[in-house]
Image (spheres, helix red, strand yellow):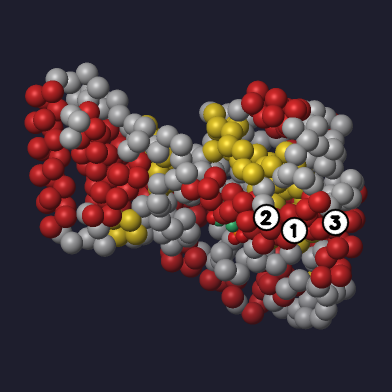
Amino acid sequence: MNYLKASKAELQKELEIQRKRFDDYKAMGLSYNMTRGKPDSAQLALSDEMLDPKYIGDGKAGETNCKNYGGIDGIDPMKKLFAELMNTNPENIIVGNNSSLNMMYDLLMKFMIFGTPAVKKPWCKSEKLKFICPVPGYDRHFLVTESLGFDLISVPILADGPDMDMIEKLVAEDEYIKGMWSVPKYSNPTGVVYSDEVVDRLGRMYTKAEDFTIFWDDAYSVHFFGDEPAKQKSLMKACEEGGHPDRCYTFMSTSKMTFPGDGVAAMGSSLANIEVVKKWINVQSIGPDKMNQLRHANFLKDYEHVIEHMRKHAKLLKPKFDVFLETFEEEMGDTGIFTWSKPEGGYFISVDTLPGLAKKTVAKCNECGVAFTPAGSTYPYKIDPQDRNIRIAPSFPPYSQLKDAATILCICVKICTLEQLLGI
Ligand SMILES: Cc1ncc(COP(=O)(O)O)c(C=O)c1O
């Protein structure tokens, strides 16, 4: 039934049906948590073999004894692997510890204090600070820039990436816009893959701030569901071609390849940027956890092995996503009141209710024993101006819970929408 075309009597009847279904589910006393975008235990087990001592061997990476201090930018085999993943050269890479988010936060703090390597004007001395946030997006990105005092400017994500017309206009006119967040492939939560045209435009656009910097968080670069990851132009290359080689930093980690708590993170940028960042971190640390880097380098080996390994993740993840996608098709297909992303990779499904209903829907699901990420989380300041978007994370809960959770979400969307349409 298309709810938007149905008569009042039809809507009332439908509401009775959905309320009955809701009550039946509620009586089951479920307690399901769909909020956590992290691997499940079967996915983690795919990397258990890495704990075998053979992956550490004698603790050496070539001449480097990983047990000792030093090697501030990481060990060679890990730089080589990240260079393959980021489509750049090992000299353009710094390999760090277990979290790319930590590297992003740390780099932003350095820019606050020292300015960017090219411009050297501390951002904290700027009269105002603004940052572009493609929406819906990753809550932790937004929180980092919010906590450092930036005004967050939302730019909608379209089918091929953020609205570039809007971005080009904003950055050309406002010297206080210092940078932008991006999750360019299988974006969190929309699953959108930025097109090469978007990448090129980001690389060549004029920005009024001479130290405008793109934080290119390629967290889901190889987290595909099909045969292989989507191809995408490197932003580092696009920035070089566009005459702004120092504009971007690419971040990546093995968090969702091996162990999120014990992975390895890296950043890539121009040689000029990398040289300065290395000097900064040389003051901060005497070297990263090279034993974990060594274990990862020996286990993941090279790009081909990473892809092989990620196919195993996809085999576990895709059926979980399919439960939600199939349920949405069955339950919501022709209702006209609900849209959802159909991601080819990543960790999330992004859904939209009619305006004004996301919070109410999530609360209703909670009442029925199913927790979804709080509505609004995918927007700066946790405020979704239209109150429509909900992020679904199918990876962590057991497969057996997913059908009920997806159905309950659909029932709650229907009830909230019907009540709105009937003015109840
Ligand atoms: C877009 C994005 N970036 C970064 C992270 C965290 O990465 P890391 O574990 O390397 O800090 C996540 C985790 O969910 C994410 O979704």
Q: Is residue 296 left or right of residue 29?
A: right
Residue 311: image location, x then y, percent: 52, 51
Q: Are marks 3 and 2 in contact (CB under 8 Å)?
A: no
Quadrant into which the N terminus falls: top left
Check the image and report above or below for 360 versus 75: above
Label 2: state its secondary structure. Answer: loop
Splitting the image into 4 quarters, where does residue 186 fall? top right
C-alpha gap between disc 3 and disc 2: 14 Å
Q: Given this view, does label 2 or label 1 mark the residue nearer the observer?
A: 2
User: Which residue matches tag 2?
Assistant: 148
- Tell which of 172 and 251 is nearer to you: 172
Number of other residues with Cα within 10 Å of mark 2, as a class: few under 14, some 14 to 19, many 20 or more: some
Query: Residue 114 got which mark?
Result: 3
- Tell me which amino acid carries mark 1: Met
Residue 203: image location, x then y, percent: 77, 33
Number of other residues with Cα within 10 Å of mark 3, as a class: few under 14, some 14 to 19, many 20 or more: some
**Total marks placed:** 3
Q: Are marks 2 and 1 in contact (CB under 8 Å)?
A: yes
Q: Indicate the quadrant of ligand 1 in the picture.
A: bottom right
* Label 2 vs 1, first from the N-terminus: 1
| Residue pictured at 67% horizontal, 48% vertical | 150
Check the image and report above or below for 418 versus 247: above
Question: Among all residues in the image, which is located at the extreme front?
Answer: 127
* Label 1 vs 3, first from the N-terminus: 1
- Tell me which amino acid carries mark 2: Leu
Query: Residue 109 got which mark?
Result: 1
